[in-house]
Image (cartoon, rainbow, N blue to C red):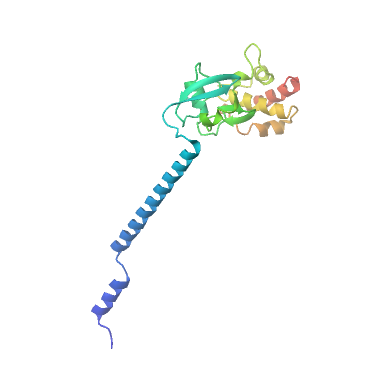
Amino acid sequence: MTKSRDESDAEKKAHNPSRRKFLKGVGIAGAGAAVVDKLWIEAEAKEEQSANGQTLSGNIKVTLDVNGEKRNVQIEPRTTLLNALRNHAEPAITGPKLVCDVGTCGACTVLLDGKPAYSCLVLAVDATKKKITTVEGLGTPENPNAVQAAFVEKDALMCGFCTPGFVTTISAYLKKNPNPSMAQVREACKGNFCRCGTYPRVFEAALAAARSGKV
C-alpha cells in the first residue's frame, strides 16, 4: 500500500528535528560545556590555592634584589617587573625602557641571574628569588663598564630608548664570549630593536669593548 503524503510528512517530522529544536539542543549542550569548564577552572584554582596556602590578591609586599640592593615594593600580583622597577620602586629605576610592552623590542632588557630577559614579560613576583641587574648596575657615569664606555666612544646611540637594552644584552654576552666575531655579535643582539638604525655602531662598540680586555 502506498503511503499518503500526510503520513510521509509526519514521519519526516518525527525523524528530522526542526532547526529550532536543533539549535535549542546545541544551546543546552553548549551551556552544559560552559558549566563544566567553569567547575573545572574553579577546581584548579582551589587546588592551586591549597598548594600555595594562600591566594594572591590586592597589593602585596615584594622584595626585589636589584643591582645588589634589596628593594621593597607594594604591587598587585599581576604587575610586571618593568612596571615594578619604573613605577613602584623608590627611587625609580628607569634604565629599562617601556617601549613595546609585548617583548618584541628589547628596550626593557634586564639580567636575571646573569641572563638577559624582557622585564615587560616577567612578573615581579616571579623575580623575587633572582638577582636583577639593570643598566644602572653595570657601571656609573664616573666608572662605566667596558660596553658603556665603548658606546660613548663609538657614538652608538641616537634617541637612547634602545641603548640600555643593547648595553645589558651585550655586557652579558661578552661575559660568555669575550672574543666574538661580528656575526656572533649580530646574532646575540637579534632580540633588540633599534628604530634609529644605529646597528653598525652598536656592533662596532660591542667589538671595541671585547678588544679592550676589560669585560
Residue furthest to the top in view is 142
How many numbered marks are there? 0
**Of residues 164 and 31, the one drawn nearer to the viewer in this rendering:** 31
On the image, the x and y values in percent for residue 10 come to 26, 75
- Residue 187 appearing in the image: yes
Q: Is 159 above or below relative to 10? A: above
In this rendering, position of residue 37 left or right of residue 99 = left
In this rendering, position of residue 206 left or right of residue 105 = right
Q: Residue at x 29, y 63 (%)?
A: 21
On the image, the x and y values in percent for residue 169 come to 63, 28
On the image, the x and y values in percent for residue 22 come to 32, 62
Query: Which corner quadrant of the image does residue 189 belong to?
Result: top right
Q: Which residue is drawn at 47% across and 39% down?
A: 50
**Of residues 39 and 23, the one drawn nearer to the viewer in this rendering:** 39
Q: Is 78 above or below relative to 67? A: below
Q: Is 34 above or below relative to 22? A: above
On the image, the x and y values in percent for residue 117 come to 59, 31
Q: Residue at x 32, y 72 (%)?
A: 15
Query: Which corner quadrant of the image does residue 147 belong to?
Result: top right
Q: Is 38 above or below relative to 172? A: below
Q: In which quarter of the image is the N terminus?
A: bottom left
- Residue 200 appearing in the image: no
Q: In which quarter of the image is the C terminus?
A: top right
Residue furthest to the bottom in view is 1
**Of residues 97 and 66, the one drawn nearer to the viewer in this rendering:** 66
